[in-house]
Image (tube, rainbow, N blue to C red):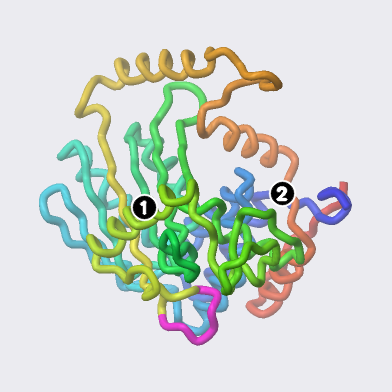
Amino acid sequence: MSERQTSLFYRAAGLADFAKQVLVRLGMAEADAGIAADSLVRADLEGNESHGISRLPIYAKRMREGRIAAVPDMSFEQSGAVLRVDGGNGLGQVVAYRAMEKALPLARENGMTGIFVRGSNHFGTAAYFCQMACRENMALIAMTNSPPGIPPWGGKKAFFGTNPLAFGFPVRSGPPVIIDMSSSVVARGKIILAQKTGESIPKGWAMDEHGAETTDPAAALRGAVLPLGGAKGYALAMAVELMCSVLSGAAYGPHVNNLYKDGDPPAGVGHSFILLDIAKWMSMDNYFDIMERFLQEVKDTPKAAGADEIYYPGERRHKEYEKRSACGLAVAPEVAGELRLLGEAVGVVFPEGEYR
């Protein structure tokens, strides 16, 4: 069946308001709840449903259990252009956003800032923080570790997280250049979402706990996700792990606890950001002129057979965002049912959707 036959469509603003109200009922400050809700719904709008509002029920469950702090006691320690952050076991989107807020003036003063965060949780899409930097005419490199998902090359047991790496560069007119990729063939969240909706996963995504390729999402979650590009993806996952754990003091590899595993202690996730104030290298007019020429030459490259247009990273994401903002968001019935039950549990009404 098609998406239109199996999914209801919801207004993005209604979903964001629902998520915000739920998080406030769970004890979060209104401003922090707004940041988290915006991050979740923005992911859905950009076509990244595995990091969207489908994550709200597990966040809420762990907050009610105390495994995620609704009001984190964050601490910040600055040394020159380096900012060290303890997230106080807060929700990752809030911890990372507040860390970036603190770092922006440091980057303006020093030209660049290294931000190393420990004591955090899943922070949604790395692209969200790249967009935050680009709105300030800054560039950003963003990384996070995560619970074990990728085996060392030649191994069959997960050790490293799927560990995304993202880059953001502002553009004068048009969407920013956003490169957001996991170290694995696919984000583990897509496998989690496939399990939730009862779908199989494609071949080449994952292995089961015995090291055999699988299309069963449950078996994949017990096993491991395959690294992007074989040994290169394994090396990339290790580099991100080192940046986010060893340099921050966060948990690493198998010591990062899984948000989806009942009974685990707090996750202990680490993030790393390198924030660059472009104006310290050149005038912004000069930067934007060069960027426009660069992107135009990329797009003017002779097209391969069957290609209608060459997109730069971030354009498709923006087009999807505009389309879904206008048309609404399709939410799978299984996800909508979870959200409705969550709303009933905390006294927040889940919005009505409509078939089209």
Query: Mark 2 and mark 1 in contact (Cβ < 8 Å)?
Result: no
Q: Is residue 232 visible?
A: yes
Residue 74 sits above or below residue 176 on the image: below
Total number of numbered labels? Answer: 2
Residue type indicated by callout 2: Leu
Which residue corresponds to the image point at 41% horizontal and 64% vertical from the top-left? 160
- Name the outermost residue toward the front: 154
Left or right, residue 232 beside residue 220:
left
**Residue nearest the observer in this picture, 115 or 108:** 115
**Residue nearest the observer in this picture, 152 or 57:** 152
Which residue corresponds to the image point at 37% horizontal and 67% vertical from the top-left? 269
Residue type indicated by callout 1: Ala
Residue 192 sits above or below residue 239 on the image: below
Q: Position of residue 22 (x, y in %)?
A: 59, 69
Q: Is residue 16 visible?
A: no
Q: Residues within 10 Å of mark 2 (few under 14, many from 20)?
A: many
Residue labelled with disc 2: 329
Q: Position of residue 240 (x, y in %)?
A: 34, 54
Q: Comparing marks 1 and 2, which lies closer to the viewer?
A: 1
Which SS class for mark 2?
strand
Q: Position of residue 27 (x, y in %)?
A: 48, 75
Residue labelled with disc 1: 235
**Residue nearest the observer in this picture, 26 or 83:** 83
- Marks 1 and 2 sit apart, C-alpha to C-alpha, by 36 Å
Which residue corresponds to the image point at 71% horizontal and 71% vertical from the top-left? 338
Residue range corresponding to the magenta coloring: 259-265
